[in-house]
Image (cartoon, helix red, strand yellow):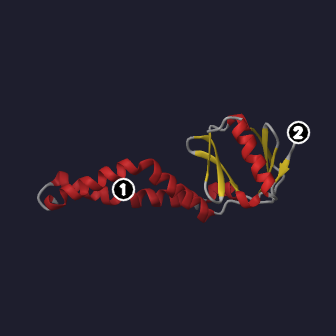
Amino acid sequence: MQQITTHPYRLEKKRYFHLLIKLFFKRKWYLITLLTGIVIYNISTFSENNFARFFIIFGIAYIPIHLYRIHRWVYSKNNANYFIESVLTADNSFLYFKDIADNETKISIATFVKMTQTEDEYLLYLSQNNFSYIPKAAFKTEEDCQYFEEIINQNSIS
């Protein structure tokens, strides 16, 4: 049984904020499109109709309110544990996350419901909104990165 260990890595707040914004737009594109259409359709009756006024203000405020909510959540002191430096050790069945305070979390690869990857990182989802961040740069060699992808795919994460 092969085992790999990464270099220490940490999720930066700015990167996490950008990931959450990207996920917000990916998940809510249809609502944003609908609100944009409603705003455009009702803009000419803004001064005449209270219903139109409400939808225009709501449509314009929707995105900034959610961006502000995400920003506050990311930069909250209560979420500092998301940004602690960690080391990942992976074998055929488990991922071991160890932080700088020597707290270790053992997670079965089979518990992850989905894996997505960008050019720079892997996102392993435990649920629809909860993911573990693993940067590709943390792997010591290209072979380690390929082995990681293999064990993730073997455990049928789509």
Residue at (82, 55) in percent of width and height: 101
**Picture quarter with the C terminus:** top right
83 horizontally vs 95: left or right: left
Q: Residue at x 86, y 45 (%)?
A: 3
| 131 relative to 70 in the view: left or right | right
The reply, left or right, for residue 7 in relation to residue 58 is: right
Secondary structure found at label 2? loop
Whole-angstrom CA distance, mark 2 to mark 1, is 50 Å
Q: Which mark is residue 126?
A: none
Which residue occupies 24% across, 53% down?
38
Q: Which residue is mark 2?
A: 1
Q: Residues within 10 Å of mark 1 (few under 14, many from 20)?
A: some
**Which image quadrant is residue 128 in?**
top right
- Which x, y percent locates residue 90? 80, 45
Residue 62's label in the rendered image is 1
Decide if residue 108 is in sight here. yes
